[in-house]
């Protein structure tokens, strides 16, 4: 094969590898953001439930 064909093949393979690496990195970032937002939602829900437990405990203590 001529040198031009080899250059074209190597260039194409390089472009494919760079595109794959970029797509993989972007996917990981998106997954990480989703996990962080889920974690924050769970923390908010946890805080609400703790407040409910406290208020129920205060009502029981007030009734005694």
Image (cartoon, rainbow, N blue to C red):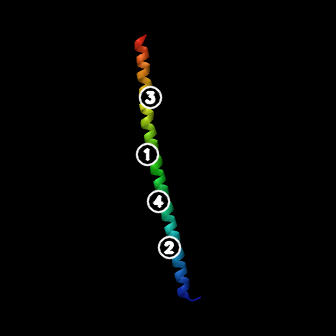
Tag 4 near tag 1, CB within 8 Å: no
Q: Looking at the picture, does residue 63 appear above or below residue 15?
A: above
Q: Residue at x 54, y 78 (%)?
A: 10
Q: Which percent across, then down, holds residue 37?
A: 43, 45
Q: Which mark is residue 6?
A: none
Q: Which residue is mark 2?
A: 15
Q: Which percent across, then down, holds residue 11?
A: 51, 78
**Residue furthest toward the right?**
1
Q: Residue at x 44, y 28 (%)?
A: 50
Of callouts 4 and 2, the N-terminal one:
2
Q: Quadrant of residue 9?
A: bottom right
Q: Which residue is mark 4?
A: 26
Q: Which mark is residue 50?
A: 3
Q: Looking at the picture, does residue 37 appear above or below residue 20?
A: above
Q: Looking at the picture, does residue 32 appear above or below residue 44?
A: below
Q: Which percent across, then down, holds residue 29?
A: 46, 55
Kindly report the distance in space between the C-alpha atoms of the residues bearing marks 4 and 2: 17 Å
Callout 3: SS: helix
Callout 1: SS: helix
Tag 2 near tag 3, CB within 8 Å: no
Kindly report the distance in space between the C-alpha atoms of the residues bearing marks 4 and 1: 17 Å
Of callouts 3 and 1, the N-terminal one:
1
Q: Which percent across, then down, holds residue 3?
A: 55, 87
**Label 3 environment density (alpha carbons within 10 Å; few <14, some 14–19, many ≥20):** few
Kindly report the distance in space between the C-alpha atoms of the residues bearing marks 1 and 2: 33 Å
**Label 2 environment density (alpha carbons within 10 Å; few <14, some 14–19, many ≥20):** few
Q: Looking at the picture, does residue 37 appear above or below residue 10?
A: above
């Amino acid at each position: 094969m001529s040198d031009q064909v080899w250059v074209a093949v190597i260039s194409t393979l390089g472009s494919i590898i760079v595109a794959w690496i970029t797509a993989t990195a972007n996917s990981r970032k998106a997954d990480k953001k989703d996990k962080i937002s889920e974690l924050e939602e769970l923390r908010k829900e946890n805080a609400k439930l703790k407040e409910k437990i406290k208020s129920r405990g205060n009502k029981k203590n007030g009734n005694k």
